[in-house]
Amino acid sequence: MIMHIDMDAFFASVEQRYNPSLKGKAVVVGGNPEKRRGVVSTCSYEARKYGIKSGMSLFQAKKLCPDATYLQCDGSKYEFISAKLQEIFSEFTPLVEPYSIDEVFLDVTGCERLWGTPVEIGLRIKQKIKRNLDLTCSVGIASNKILAEVASGMQKPDGLTFVPKEKMEGLIYPLPIQELCGVGPNTLKVMHKFGIRTIGQLASYSKEVIKSALGKYGENLYYSVQGENDSIVLPVQLQPEEKSIGHEQTLVEDIGDGEKLSAFLLFLSSRVARRVRRGNFLAKTVTVKVRFSDFFTLSKSESLKEPTNSEEEIYKMGKKLLGHLFSGMQKVRLLGISVSNLIKTSFPQQLSLPFSIHSEKKKNLLFAVDKLKDEFGERVVTWGTCLLTPE
Amino acid sequence: MNMSRKLFTPWGKEIESVQPIEVVALFEKGKMKPIRFRLGGKVFKIQQINGSWENRVGKYKKIHFAVVDSASNLFEISYDEREMNWSLERIETL
């Protein structure tokens, strides 16, 4: 039996936990509230009453509810609480798959003799989270991940929904097809083409037609809504390697100055390269993404001649790509860089050997910088271009 | 008051606005509990600790506390394990 646990308004609830005077009030977390930049990451249920939603621009949110409390994301707080949650989940089953910072899948099959029925396990977990962390969550229990995810959304906040196979027809089948995890606008278009608007309609459709239209994903979806998908819950240590590594960030103010943008690109490249080296990868393809003031977004990719883990090489390619995307005509609101085509190296911290494009000195410098950052944190040393400037 | 200068990255992100503070703390059952702190000559008595959390800076820990004083002001103070010093990270006056 699979359980999906979704923390209720996670970032906002954590902020309320650390500042109880915010409890029961409209709290919006995300972006830079002072400059009204960025988007809403999460908001409390009180803020949702005003129509504020995740992903909405802060500017729009402030129009809807100017009196809400607007807070910047504090990642360290959320990561700390998320780690505490993982500890709680791991007490009940070793099969815990983090889906995001505030969502998790648990396989509780075979845990009944220790903890009771799946519903009892769900209730115990909810109680423990409330008692230890003063937070609430919504739990969905079903025969597979897709249905458990649908179930957790059925009684939010602070709900628990168990959907045994025999009750699927009554509980799940009437729901719109977009309630299924992963059904985005493109899949929805295909579904609508076949006249599929509810989960029940998908369940009674021909498997072959769904498979030919949506491939393996469609087939998985089809089996899931029959309650038959046996996709396993994968703990972190068993998960496959990442396929790409990237960082993107909305700028505090739109930037039209090429030099400043390049400096920011170097900063992002350094973060990307460090993760590449940490994972013992070499990267072959670089992608740059630019979002302009009017939200028009462009991206461009190009492969390097040799795979690398050096920020210098990633940045050089990134700067070339940025040159194609940014002409200086319009200001930039968001900048991102990512690398893909990752190759796993056999030795920790191995640099571009045997395809060496670095001098020995540069390699040693990167090693030294990594060591310093491991010891003293990411800010201990940086590129001159990224040097801080006084206000 | 010992104000640290505000610093910004070239793209305008504020990265440092913390102020050093002096803290009296109790160490009890393996846990650290700040009791009061001095900021700019004024002593603030901690009435309540709403919670704490940690993050890592390199291989060292930084422990943050959300605390409330007798005037119901909310402060975020932190203890840096490597530097062995305390800082005021944020103030919210109610």
Image (cartoon, coloured by chain):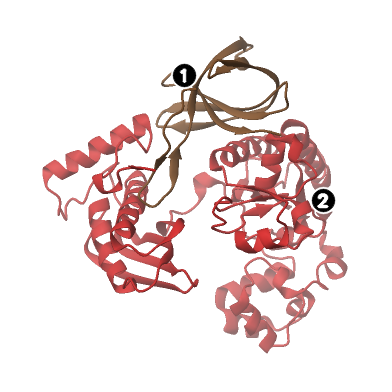
Chain colours: A red, B brown
**As drawn, B46 above or below A58:** above
Q: Is residue B37 visible?
A: yes
What residue appears at the point 67 percent right and 33 percent down from the top-left corner?
Answer: B93
Q: Identify the secondary structure beneath mark 1.
A: strand
Q: Are marks 2 and 1 on the same chain?
A: no
Horizontal placement of A94 versus A356: left or right?
right
Q: Is residue A143 visible?
A: no
The quadrant of the image that shows the C terminus of chain B is top right
Q: Position of residue A346 (x, y in %)?
A: 28, 47
Mark 1 crowd level (few <14, some 14–19, many ≥20, 10 Å Cα): some
What residue appears at the point 65 percent right and 53 percent down from the top-left corner?
Answer: A42
Where is residue A16, by image quadrant?
top right
**As drawn, A137 above or below A200:** above
Where is residue A335, by image quadrant?
bottom left
Q: Which kind of residue does numbered mark 2 sit on?
A: Leu
Q: CA distance from mark 2 to mark 1?
A: 45 Å
**As drawn, A258 above or below B52:** below
Q: Which kind of residue does numbered mark 1 sit on?
A: Asn
Q: Which residue is mark 1?
A: B85
Q: Position of residue A74 (x, y in %)?
A: 56, 42
Check the residue under mark 1 and report the chain it is in: B
Horizontal placement of A355 versus B15: left or right?
left
Horizontal placement of A18 versus A341: left or right?
right
- Say which mark, if any, is on residue A160: 2
Number of numbered callouts drawn = 2
